[in-house]
Image: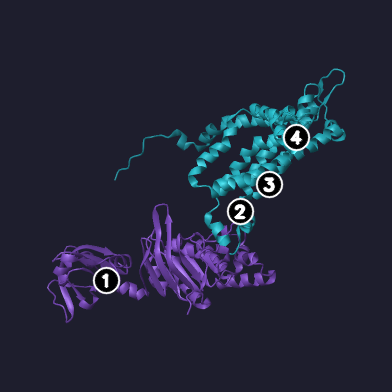
Chain colours: A purple, B cyan
Amino acid sequence: MTPAIRVRGLRRTFGSVVAVDNVDLDVIDGEFLTLLGPSGSGKTTVLRMIAGFERPDAGTIELAGVNVTNAPPYARDVNTVFQDYALFPHMTVLENIEYGLRVKKVPKAERRARALEALEGVRLTDLGDRAPSQLSGGQRQRVALARALVNRPKVLLLDEPLGALDLKLREQMQVELKAIQRDVGITFVFVTHDQDEALTMSDRIAVFNEGRIVQLGTPAEIYEFPASEFVAGFVGTSNLLRDETALAVLGSAGTWSIRPEKIRIAAAGTAGEAGERAVAGTVREVIYVGMSTRMVIDLAPGGTLVAVEQNSGRHADQRLAMRGENVTLLWNTEHEYSVN
Amino acid sequence: MTTTTATHRGFWYRHPGLRLGGLLTAPMAWLVVVYLGSLGALFLTAFYQVDDFTSQVVRSFSLKNFQTLFTTSAYYQSVFRTISIALLVTILCLVIAVPLAFFMARVAPRNWRPVMIALVLTPLWASYLVKVYAWRSMLQPETGVIAWFLKPLGLDGPGYGYVGIVITLTYLWLPYMILPVYAGLTRLPDSMLDASADLGAHSGRTFRSIVIPMIFPSVVAGSIFTFSLSLGDYITAQIVGGKVTMLGNIVQQTYVTNLPFAAAVATLPVIIIVLYLLAVRKTGALESV
């Protein structure tokens, strides 16, 4: 099957900075793909090149099998939700949503009907006559979404659309966006630097670093089996044992990752069950984060690991008092994951 | 537990009313007495008369001056001519300034901007009179630069007159149009243009439907400058206007012999500008000046 988007050898430089370096990517029709990476990793530039706002220095972009590398944005069957929403301030909400249809000369009656339907789809039915400036951040976000979706694009591009919202609203919109994507069945390409957001919403994640895709896979694959030290550190907590430390603790050299929630904290001297590794250590730091507690533990053979425990058992004060205590860390050896 | 009180008295802090008064007295006195006072005197004088025998101003109220203004063809033609010049100058400034400002704000590299702004402002460093006399020599019939350029094409230059006035005033007030439009364009987020293209609009459509409406307040702000400056000008008309007169020239010609009539003539541009400001107030342009 032809992918919704096929990107080959994409490259873009700004002056002497290589923003995107030889990126290949196939986006499957109907999937929710997230481009995840730190700022400056090239994910937004890739999105902007797919939309047509930036011209690549090299490489090709195909949309549904058609080469659009040199096509202007208005000739591409994709729509974008912008980070700052980019709602036109001199138009009402409804006029904003109708704009794309008006430009394409859709007859007035149909235009109005589709815009109202789109407005209903984002649950803002009564706000059509408002100016964008009279809306809250979350409402603007939805208008931007409706304005893009009303054109029924093959692909919807979202450039950190939830970045400006507060945490509560952001979590709510994550669920809502995912539901909308399932309903309309459009391919979503979503850019974010927020790993939780990426893990929550995506069918697949492409992790970017320094202009390249360093790993592409499902959220579980990315989290459980990071392909490199960078991915292990960027997605989830960096919990690595290296070289001599790895040799001392695990018995083999190289770089190893152990996810914090896989580690159990027990009283000093506790022996592990079958398949478990027991390592002695000292609690250096206890960080209370409400739902859970993060403990930073210096291991006796060397190295430092972070362990996370749910705050279901012991009282928070008891945990905080554990600073400086000697403990034993236990984890199943199958959770030791080599990231070489 | 003992508490101590901060010893610093802060007289002005504790008397915000006096503070405000101290701040505003001088500018308010200037505004009310010098500016509004003289404007009021002008309005009042416009309704007085001159005694034909003694040439003294008679303080009796009548609309006779305005009657003369609107019934004497030389006068009312001058009114319409002045308004048409101001309108033409504004339109020409707009036609030149919008593409230029667009280039400065959105096309040229960002580090060229200071240089380009300096270049736009350079003409303002020269004296007004110097610039108008420069245009006088350029516009000179037969021997002026413009006539010389046009001669091979078989054309005469505009010479001194209506066209000369419009060209000169357009040159003089152009920076006052470029700057607000430029400022408006730099405030326009890139994402607005991207969004319009993304929704299927080619460049021309984006310019028409997004750029122009969004910078409209800036355009109006610029037009307030070009329109009102043109409306009140009389020196340019004197130097490059030939026999063509504007309202300001009538004021200049009559204020010695008939001060009340000159005041009536001078009132007219003020009324036109006030009407214009009232009309544009709704566009939000007055916040963009």
What is the C-alpha distance between the residues marked 1 and 2? Answer: 51 Å
Residue B117 at what x, y percent from top left? 54, 39
B249, B48: nearer the viewer: B249
Give the number of the mark in front: 3 or 2: 2
Q: Is residue A161 visible?
A: no
Give the number of the mark in front: 4 or 3: 4
Vertical order, B174 against A8 (above or below): above
What is the C-alpha distance between the residues marked 4 and 3? Answer: 34 Å
Vertical order, A21 against B75 (above or below): below
Vertical order, B141 against B186 (above or below): above
Q: Chain of mark 4?
A: B
Give the number of the mark in front: 4 or 2: 4
Q: Chain of mark 1?
A: A
For mark 3, what is the residue? B280
Q: Do the residues at pointers 1 and 2 share their chain? A: no
Label 4 CA crowd tier, 10 Å (few <14, some 14–19, many 20+): some
Q: Do the residues at pointers 3 and 1 share their chain? A: no
B63, B258: nearer the viewer: B258
For mark 1, what is the residue? A259
What is the C-alpha distance between the residues marked 4 and 2? Answer: 35 Å
Disc on the earlier residue, 3 or 2: 2
Disc on the earlier residue, 4 or 2: 4
In terms of image quadrants, where is residue B32?
top right
For mark 4, what is the residue? B158
**CB atoms of marks 3 and 1 within 8 Å:** no
